[in-house]
Amino acid sequence: MGLFSKDISTFHDLYVHQLEDLYYAEQQITKALPKMIDKATDVTLRQGFEQHLRETEGQIERLRRVFDIEGMQPKGVTCPAIDGIIKEANEVAGEVSDKAVLDAALTAAAQAVEHYEIARYGTLITWARQLGKSDVAAILQETLDEEKATNDKLTQLATGTINAQAERASA
């Protein structure tokens, strides 16, 4: 056994592992987002987190469709990467007392999650296409497009107001 939770001997095994990894990650994100919603004080940031929670629930449904296409029961494998990103976000948020600075920290944490998902979905789409699974690739592309749009919104929010408010609060 190597880096992964089970022996992977084929490219298809690797593809399935990635699918299970993302399923687990999306489940963990749906648990983390309500906490982020509760902590966010910026109304637009809070609304963005609420919207992304609904999107994430839809993304889980898409992954279930993919598992169904594969003839598999939806199953996740522990993903230390997403667990680490969420743990770090919780630790940083717990250390910030100023609300404006906290919103900046939450925005950065959300972007770390988005960047992880963008990388993973992009890889999985490429692998699905390589394996001749264009139907799966199309389903996953919907999610990748949502993840990129969320990241863009977070960037606009951070550079438009959140970071400036945090800087003013720190002055």
Image: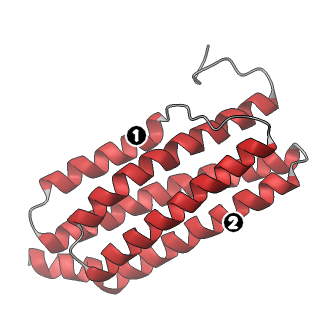
Mark 2: give few (<14), some (14-19) or many (20+) Cα within 10 Å. few
Q: Which residue is mark 1?
A: 83
Q: Residue furthest top?
A: 1
- Splitting the image into 4 quarters, where does residue 75 fall? top right
Amino acid type, callout 1: Asp
Q: Which residue is mark 2?
A: 142
Quadrant in which the N terminus is drawn: top right
Instruction: Please give the label number shown on residue 146.
Output: none
x and y percentages locating residue 141 in the rendered image: 72, 62
Report whether residue 158 is seen: no
Residue plotted at (75% across, 28% down): 13
Residue plotted at (40% across, 40% down): 83
Residue plotted at (36% across, 77% down): 47
Q: Considering only vertical position in the picture, is 145 above or below 5?
A: below
Give the structural element (helix, strand or loop) at label 1: helix
Give the structural element (helix, strand or loop) at label 2: helix
- Splitting the image into 4 quarters, where does residue 110 fall? bottom left
Is residue 128 toward the left or the right of residue 104 in the image? right
Give the number of the mark in front: 1 or 2.
Answer: 2
